[in-house]
Amino acid sequence: MSKPKVYVTRMIPEPGLALLREHCLVAVNDRDRPLAREELLANVRDAEGVIGQLTDKIDAGFFDAAARLKGYANYAVGYDNIDVAEASRRRLPVSNTPDVLTRATAELAWALLFAVARRIVETDAVMRSGAWPGWGPLQFLGLDVSGKTLGILGPGRIGQAMALMSQGFAMTVLYHGGSKPALAIEEKLGARRVDFDTLLAESDFISIHAPLTPASRRLFGAEAFAKMKRTAVIVNTSRGPVIDEAALAVALREKTIAGAGLDVYEFEPKMAEGLRELQNVVVTPHIGSATRSTRDNMALLAARNLLAMLRGDTPPTCLNPEVLGKK
Ligand code: DGY
């Protein structure tokens, strides 16, 4: 029997590709950039399986172009780039990569939180410039973390991991969102589920882990920032459009809130006007899952998902298992 044709829309770590090659004829976009829409559609025409990125729009037009498709595997946990309802309507399984990147993403959220609280990037620049005159009692005063209140928006896997990592810092933990109570963090940390306004008003640090949905889009705008403490810091490692970035730039400039740590942006790869000039924001280029082993594991999971779909089996982390007639 001939091997199924698979297309991978961007080079991913070798372990995933090697696994795919054992069973499939694999073509990869090896240019180090996302494909333009027309390139994507042209490349998936005869593919039976596709592994794609959060930058690829997987919608009706994509499914029309990929007429031989048996399944699509996202190389990301976030799947706001996929029209899952459309895939289900066509009875096509689609998958994402949860779990394998939970700790790496939560760790980056902590790195950003501390970088902002203790002014790490700003003071690193002072050292490099040679301008540090020596120790001074009033220099570079930052924010305490221990004993403060951590607010989690989106108590899913990553949000709960972030909360659990606060244990060493004796923080009070609040959370908002989720369809049911987050029992692990309630039981282990005494975390309290609160409404959005309470999260805003009581948190010293807010970390965003909610998926991008119509309800979460621009949830943080001028109105929300005005309800936060002036000493509060917001961290976003989820999806950029959860924050109205222009409003954030204003809030940071006017010191409505104290700081922000951002790994994701409303209009990636661009950053809102005005953010670049501010000292109270630390910015990284969407690297939440960017550790070697995490990316290897994402590639392996995406490959396993796709191979299962090609066999007609339920993939390990399927977003719409009902299309396969199994739960
Ligand atoms: C994801 O997986 O959704 C991240 O944004 C990239 O790894």
Image (cartoon, helix red, strand yellow):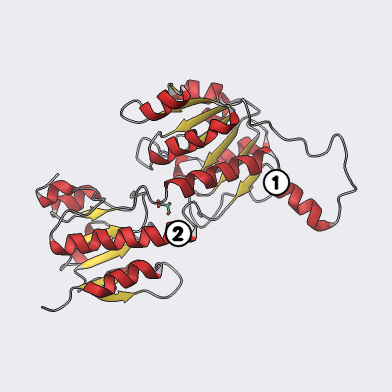
**Marks 2/1: CA–CA distance:** 26 Å
Residue 105 location in percent, x, y?
48, 47
Other-residue count near label 2 (Cα within 10 Å), few / some / many at <14 / 14–19 / ≥20: some
Q: Amino acid at mark 1?
A: Ile
Quadrant of the image containing the N terminus: bottom left
Residue 81 location in percent, x, y?
33, 53
Other-residue count near label 1 (Cα within 10 Å), few / some / many at <14 / 14–19 / ≥20: some
Residue 68 vertical position relative to residue 90 in the rendered view, above or below:
below
Residue wearing tag 1 = 120
**SS type, badge 1:** helix
Relative side of 249 to 289, left or right: right
Residue 94 vertical position relative to residue 44 in the rendered view, above or below:
above
Quadrant of the image containing the C terminus: top left
Relative side of 310 to 304, left or right: left
Q: On the image, which quarter does residue 26 sit in?
A: bottom left
Q: Which mark is residue 293?
A: 2
**SS type, badge 2:** helix
Earlier residue among tags 2 and 1: 1
Residue 11 location in percent, x, y?
40, 70
Of badges 2 and 1, nearer the viewer stands 2
Q: Amino acid at mark 2?
A: Ser
Relative side of 169 to 73, left or right: right
Q: Using the rendered image of the protein, determine whether residue 29 is visible from the camera's viewpoint.
A: yes
Instruction: Tell me whether the residue at label 2 lies in contact with that at label 1, contact meaning CB atoms closer than 8 angstroms.
Output: no
| Residue found 36% across the figure and 26% down from its top | 183
Q: Which mark is residue 60?
A: none
Q: Nearer the viewer, residue 191 or 130?
A: 191
Q: Using the rendered image of the protein, determine whether residue 36 is visible from the camera's viewpoint.
A: no
Residue 174 location in percent, x, y?
48, 25
